[in-house]
Image: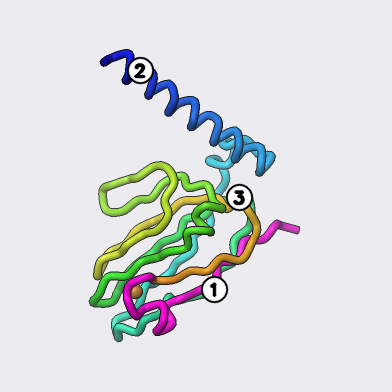
Amino acid sequence: MIKKWLRWGLLVVLGMFLWLSYVGGVLAVPVGDLLKQPVSEVRVSLGNRENELKFIPNNFEFVVGKRYKLVLDNPSLQKHYFTSKDFADASWTQKVEAGKVEIKGNIHELELKPGAVAEWFFVPVKPGSYLLRCPIAGHTEAGMTGIIKVVVDG
Ligand SMILES: [Cu+2]
């Protein structure tokens, strides 16, 4: 039993090491240096007090290799998602902070209940143009969408 856990533990550590070296390789920057980078804060609201179905703003541009803190808040009276799976896959997530909880590791989407705030710390890895949307029934159709661009600096 203990042996099994040990083996899994080793696999997880090895996996994390490989992932970090992969990210470091793509960025040509050691991850340790990434964490020392100053963090740029960007804000986004999921809906508003008038309960309009939109992201504010709905257009983002991030630079590969820079570290960001995306502060998400939901000032509306209904829950919303911040879903951009391809963007999440094209980024290295350091952590998500919400209330007194800090979650490490990769994520695919965030759900914010009315009044919620969350902070997503990430480093974009792959340039591209990614679709953002709220997949709750009717919300994407009503225009709760956006574009996240990831560009290479210079
Ligand atoms: Cu929504």
- Quadrant location of residue 37? top right
- Quadrant location of residue 133? bottom left
Q: Is residue 97 left or right of residue 13?
A: left
Give the mark, 2 or 1, whose residue is nearer the N terminus: 2
Check disc 2 and report the residue beneath it: 6
Position in image of residue 86 (x %, y %): 53, 58
Position in image of residue 142 (x %, y %): 40, 84
Check disc 3 and report the residue beneath it: 125
Magenta highlight range: 135-154
The N terminus - image quarter: top left
Give the mark, 2 or 3, whose residue is nearer the N terminus: 2
From what the image shows, is residue 53 above or below residue 64? below
In the depicted view, which residue is nearer to us: 51 or 128? 128
Please name the residue shown 60% across and 50% down the image: 125
Q: Is residue 146 left or right of residue 29?
A: left
Residue labelled 2 has its Cβ within 8 Å of some atom of ligand 1:
no
For label 1, the SS is strand
Please name the residue shown 32% across and 13% down the image: 3
Check disc 1 and report the residue beneath it: 59
Please name the residue shown 35% across and 77% down the image: 47
User: Does the CB distance between marks 1 and 3 fall below 8 Å?
Assistant: no
In which of the image's four quarters is ligand 1 placed? bottom left
Residue labelled 1 has its Cβ within 8 Å of some atom of ligand 1:
no
User: Does the CB distance between marks 2 and 3 fall below 8 Å?
Assistant: no
The C terminus - image quarter: bottom right
From mark 2 to mark 1, how far is it between C-alphas?
A: 45 Å
Q: Is residue 64 left or right of residue 82?
A: right
Q: Amino acid at mark 1?
A: Asn
